[in-house]
Image: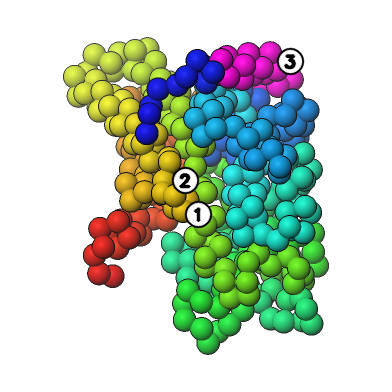
Amino acid sequence: MDLHFTEADEAFRIEIRTWLEGNLVDEFAALKGRGHLGDMDGVIPGRRRWEQRMVEAGWTCVGWPRAHGGRGLSLLQEVIFNEEYARARAPGRLGHIGEGLLGPTLMAFGTPEQQARFLPRIVDGTELWCQGYSEPNAGSDLANVKCRAEPDGDDYRLTGQKVWTSLAQDSDWCFVLARTSTEAKRHHGITCFLIPMDADGINVVPIKQITGGTEFCEVFFDGALAKGEHIIGEVGGGWRVAMGTLAFERGASTLGQQLNFQTELDEIIQAAKHNGTAADPVIRQRIADVYIRLRIMRLNALRTLTGHDDGTPPRAAMITKLYWASWHRDLGELAMDVLGADCMVLPESGELSELQRLFLWTRSDTIYAGTNQIQRNIIGERALGLPR
């Protein structure tokens, strides 16, 4: 992949940078840096208004084809958009799940009727989505889902539990994996449903986290009705749909995530300069180490974005989650060592500092979206061809 940006790409960079600078003002200035991992449930009303500001300017779903309401940006321009968004410290996107996961999934596997019903409401920010995949006994082992879907005429009734459902309490719809056959083998008999979160028989219970936030939720289904017309793909074909969704999750937004990482590293460096730990040769070496590893992360992400002709990512992309999760955990530990004993004391506000929240949040990085152990299995089996 050519890692150089063209003049047109750089002109686009200036366009989005200028727009962000001109709009992250007044009430939106207070949203800078808010709503990202570890703070996803923060300042929801303000972020809803920010989403509408982006809708008005045509900055949602920028990588989607124009036929589906997007801007039809090239892959590199989508990378630039995400980088500039992160550089401006713009608030975390409330529409991320719909825009980055459900939307591309519907384009790949949905019917024309489903696309016409749901895609425009993702573009205009009027419907927010959450993802119902993980369960108490099926987190990284997604094929072990037990949530049942039983026929009710042409429709289905969902019964079971999902967990770690990000922002379920603020979402309008959920895409859910449920088992439509108990006799089929593990990866078969699973179906992907779309279901409104206000349906009878759905109960959302936010989970209080160590950071104090409640961005994750448990979702309980007690005979909730999912319409047959809202099945994505075929009945029993949900595993293929789920794998497609997970592939979309490794998209261009990862470059924006890495600029957020750079912001966190910059804050650690400033703290080290302020309290004198920057003079410690061990701390200096650790800072240099995480800096180098972050540069490697960016280059590898750019190198693996293009994928194969059939849309599947290259084998080298399979290291991505394991690499950045371990790196981010190490960054959180570095932050605490830079702060020293001060890391154990809350600021006068009584709220966690950004670096304290960083450390506590990164405890989860090597667990969610596939544990490090599961990631190593994926690399061994799918990238290296080793036996199970």
Looking at the picture, how far across and down is residue 12, in whole percent? 58, 19
**Is residue 314 visible to us here?**
yes
Q: Which segment is the magenta one?
A: 11-30
Describe the element under mark 2 as helix, strand or loop: loop
Residue sitting at x 44%, y 66%: 141
Describe the element under mark 1 as helix, strand or loop: helix
Describe the element under mark 3 as helix, strand or loop: helix
Q: Does the residue at mark 2 contact the one at mark 1 (Cβ under 8 Å)?
A: yes
349 relative to 337 in the view: left or right: right
Task: Give the Cα separation between the discs numbered 3 and 2.
Answer: 34 Å
Q: Residue furthest left?
A: 281
Residue sitting at x 74%, y 72%: 228
Give, as a three-letter code, the residue at label 1: Leu
Judging from the image, the colouring scheme is rainbow
Looking at the picture, how far across and down is residue 242, in whole percent? 54, 61
Residue topped by disc 3: 26
Looking at the picture, how far across and down is residue 355, in whole percent? 45, 29
Give, as a three-letter code, the residue at label 3: Asp
Residue sitting at x 59%, y 44%: 100
Q: Does the residue at mark 1 contact the one at mark 3 (Cβ under 8 Å)?
A: no
Label 1, residues with CA under 10 Å away: few <14, some 14-19, many ≥20:
few
